[in-house]
């Protein structure tokens, strides 16, 4: 499994908050990514039908495993489809729903967003929530809400290259 994303600043903070119990037992994880993946036109990746799930979503599958710990998925549903205006061969629209006992997760990938990219992660637990959002994976803002109030830590670093440093 490709795991460099777990060391991206926003996911690393989120993982530590969950691991230390700041949010309590998790009940929901919802992630959305809207960006343009047409940049792979003409590459070997374009030959991969499940490109979004194999090459890209693998990072989100890994973070689900990190956040849910020992909790096993009960059911996983996934689908792919082509956007009407995409230019490369593989479907660039994908969604995944994962059911756990007492929890759910959803992953949405819109790889054909030509303008206005956006990425969000929302995690809800019995004692708090964390929301991450930004124009791309490099620039994320994180807000944590617990009974003690709202905090917005200053994150340092970026997915590239910091995520790769973590894997090495």
Image (cartoon, rainbow, N blue to C red):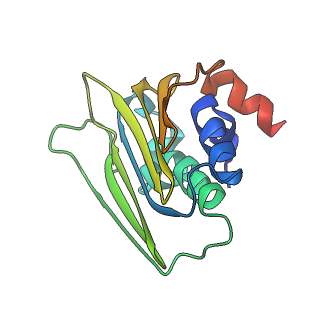
The vertical placement of 114 against 58, above or below, is: above
| Residue 122 image position (x, y, % from top left) | 42, 46
Quarter of the image where the C terminus is located: top right
The image quadrant that residue 32 belongs to is top left
The image quadrant that residue 83 belongs to is top left
Q: Residue at x 47, y 24 (%)?
A: 141
166 left or right, relative to 96:
right
* Residue 36 visible in the picture: no
| Residue 135 image position (x, y, % from top left) | 38, 22
- Residue reaching furthest to the front: 148
The vertical placement of 14 against 160, above or below, is: below
Q: Residue 83 or 101: which is nearer the viewer?
A: 101
Q: Residue 39 or 134: which is nearer the viewer?
A: 134
| Residue 90 image position (x, y, % from top left) | 35, 49
Q: Residue at x 53, y 22 (%)?
A: 138
| Residue 157 image position (x, y, % from top left) | 66, 19
Q: Residue at x 71, y 50 (%)?
A: 20
Q: Residue at x 56, y 57 (%)?
A: 64
166 left or right, relative to 95:
right
């Amino acid at each position: 499994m490709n795991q460099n994303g777990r060391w991206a600043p926003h996911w690393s903070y989120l993982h530590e908050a969950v691991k230390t119990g700041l949010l309590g037992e998790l009940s929901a994880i919802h992630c959305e990514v809207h960006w343009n993946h047409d940049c792979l036109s003409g590459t070997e990746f374009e030959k991969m039908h499940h490109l979004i799930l194999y090459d890209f979503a693998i990072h989100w599958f890994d973070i689900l495993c990190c956040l849910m710990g020992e909790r096993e998925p009960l059911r996983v549903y996934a689908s792919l489809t082509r956007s009407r205006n995409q230019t490369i061969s593989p479907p660039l629209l994908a969604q995944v729903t994962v059911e756990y006992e007492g929890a759910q997760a959803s992953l949405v990938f819109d790889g054909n967003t030509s303008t206005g990219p956006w990425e969000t992660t929302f995690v809800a637990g019995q004692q708090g929530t964390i929301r991450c959002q930004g124009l791309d994976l490099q620039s994320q803002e994180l807000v944590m809400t617990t009974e003690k109030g709202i905090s917005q830590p200053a994150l340092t670093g970026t997915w590239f290259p910091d995520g790769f440093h973590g894997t090495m």
